[in-house]
Amino acid sequence: MNRFAPSPGANAAGLRRDDSVERLALFALSAPALLLVLVTMIAPVAWLFGLSFLDDAGSVSLEHYRRMIDQPSYGRTFLVTFQVSLLTTAICIAAGYPLAYAVSQMPTRAANLCLILVLLPFWTSLLVRTYAWLVLLQRKGLINEWGIRLGWWDEPLALVHNMTGTLIGMVHIMLPFLVLPLLGAMRAIDADYQKAAASLGASPMRAFWSVFFPLSMPGLLAGTLIVFILCLGFYVTPAVLGGGKVIMVSNHIANDIELFFNWGAASALGVVLLVLTLAFLFVAVRLLRLDKVLGGVHG
Amino acid sequence: MSWFSEPASPTQITHGARLWLYVVAALVLAFLIVPTLIVIPMSFSESQYLEFPPREWSLRWYRNYFASTAWMQATVTSFQAGALTTVLATPLGTLAAYGLFASRYRWAHMIHVLMITPIIVPVILVAIAVFYVYVKIKLVNSLTGIVLAHSMLAIPLVIMIVTSALKSYDMNQEMVARSLGASRARAFLSVTLPQIRFAVISSALLAFLTSFDEVVLAMFVSGGGNSTLTRNMFLALRDQIDPTIAAISTLMIVVTTALLAFSQRFGQTHRG
């Protein structure tokens, strides 16, 4: 027996009791925040969850879920949501990878400056940025005006109140979410690997594609999944830059409430959106240990 | 040897051969920055149609904004909601992060995840759920309602930032303070809190901005005499393009930048 272990006397029991009382007291510090989240978020969402399984007469039914399959408008909404999310993610990768790569290769000072520029939009109001695009992309907007003046096109292009405008606005918002994890992964790559590749005779191209790119994959995957998951729940950008023509799941939910006061339908759609989000999040956590990123207590 | 022919990486590729990469990166950065900045000169334009560069300069849209009771009232509401959210969410979130971290229960992780859910659940679902409950308990269009809902959104952010600061903090320092006779509360306030101060200040700033910039919950929950600035802006954007919004956007950029600069200074000077 370990003779340094506390003797099983009265004092040890007292200490243990003190310790557990204190741990409980510490835990109780989280109660107010927990209560607030429970009352304003978990309970209301649970309520809607229950509501989604009730028909108009108040009895249990799958009516609202069945309607999602029967009515083609819901199918279109899901199609548009996936389409917009996939395209936004793809464009973010195409634009974000070169940017992250360039920044990762810069000297520290220049890289930090670029990083600030990438972070800047993060801190600017979503509405301000959406407004900026609305102004730039409209028929008489800056981009059309200059495009015509420079002779690139003759008629004003329809750049906003449609899919194009929505995609531009969403890429603008999501790009930093892709660049940041990607840059983190790229910065962690040891430059010696590329030196080794070069000294073994690999061309710069070859060294990039067979050494650097595979090593940057975890960051790219993390960024891609974050962007895709966040895109699924977008509301403001499609509502403003889509001009009512791009109806994603969130917009459909809002319409069900604002125009039709149909709580059951809106709730059911919300539940499906939540399940989709959680499913993709689960995949992301499994693939990447994203829970580390989200910052657990015992990470 | 010019810069173009210098090697730019360990693979001996030259800056010249990589020029396209720099051009692409610069274009993407411009895409990120320029649209927001272009709103600023536009807001000083005289014209009804937003032109760039403006042909005539004026403060017309700023006068419009400051003369409008609706916009002024919304601005006051937004600042009130932001300030109250900060005051509520920062201490609650900090206490929760500290409590969960220091209690060392194995299942504290579950509670932690539970409290982070507001940033995972799609905001539209949260918005209609909160709206549904607020209608029943008559909190719709009230400042209290907005502050509670925004605090719920801000608490996860506070918890995440403070928890990550606590992880890099040595809890043994608190033990030392306590062995010297300090109570747990005293040890937290005079030893731990000063060292995680920067995280607490950043999270307070983030809590303010979360509320100040929030649109979707505000759309459903605020209204009437307690309509927020973002709600009014969103409704205006859906209907027509009012240049007054350019003026408001410029002011919002100024407010955010000032807050950021303030927190940056504050964090830096008190760190060492």
Image: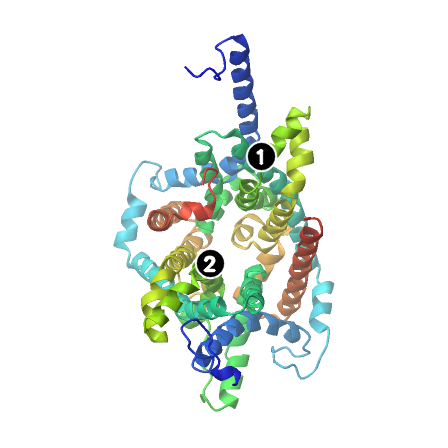
Task: Identify residue for label 2.
Answer: A184
A33 and B69: which is toward the camera: A33
Q: Position of residue A277 (x, y in %)?
A: 37, 50
Please say whether residue B269 is visible from this viewpoint: yes
Q: What element carries label 1?
A: loop
Q: Residue B248 lies in what quarter of the image?
A: bottom right
Q: Residues within 10 Å of mark 1 (few under 14, many from 20)?
A: some
Mark 1 is on which residue type? Answer: Met
The residue carrying mark 1 is: B171
Coloration of the structure image: rainbow
Spatial CA distance of label 1 from label 2 is 28 Å
Q: Is residue A55 above or below residue A30?
A: below
Q: Nearer the viewer, residue B109 or A101?
A: A101
| B45 left or right, relative to B115 | right
Do pointers 1 and 2 mark residues of a single chain?
Answer: no
Please name the amino acid that badge 2 sits on: Gly
Q: Mark 2 Cα within 10 Å, few/some/many (few <14, many 20+)?
A: some
Element type at mark 2: helix
